[in-house]
Amino acid sequence: MSLLLCVATVALWIGSYRSVRTAYSLGPEREIWAIRGQIQYFRWYQGWYSGDLQDDWRYLGFGYSRKNFLFVCVPIWFLTFLTILPPARWLWLRRGENRRISEGQCAVCGYDLRATPDRCPECGTILAKGA
Ligand SMILES: [Zn+2]
């Protein structure tokens, strides 16, 4: 599921460079664009007063601006990074689990199970040995 989301963001990332822009309208005054490796969110306000409410901030592809409209942009690599974390963590945990089992240790706590192969005396995990 999360891996699918990760693939989707990578596809969006590549797509944002290939096409001129991909715009998703979220209403009459809101739009999301995928452009040059960034997700950009625009919101226009009716009768926006651009007097004292002025902000402009950019950093590493992140951006925030509040001049004639609200503008927020997030780099897609950041989204890809976020979506890649859960599957990467899962793989990492799976790797540790498999290594422990192959070394005769409890998959949950790592306790040496060579003396008690059916049940972990440390954490109580019942092992499906001989299945
Ligand atoms: Zn255990």
Image (spheres, rainbow, N blue to C red):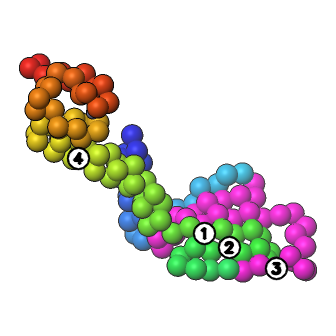
The tag on residue 96 is 4
Q: Between tags 1 and 4, which lies in front? A: 4
The tag on residue 73 is 1
Classify 10 Å Cα crowding around label 4: few (below 14), some (14-19), many (20 and above).
Answer: few
CA–CA distance between discs 3 and 1?
16 Å
Q: Where is residue 104 in the image (x, y as percent from the top left)?
A: 12, 37
In the image, what residue type sits under mark 3? Gln
Of residues 90 and 122, the one nearer the viewer is: 122
The residue singled out by tag 2 in the image is 64
Residue appearing at x 38%, y 55% in the figure: 84
Q: In the rendered structure, which disc, 3 or 1, sits on the residue that comes first in sequence?
A: 3
Callout 3: helix, strand or loop?
Answer: loop
Residue appearing at x 25%, y 27% in the figure: 121
Instruction: Let me know if residue 16 is in the magenta part.
Output: no
Q: Do the residues labelled 2 and 1 touch (CB within 8 Å)?
A: yes
CA–CA distance between discs 2 and 3?
11 Å
Decide if residue 21 is in sight here. no
The residue singled out by tag 3 in the image is 54
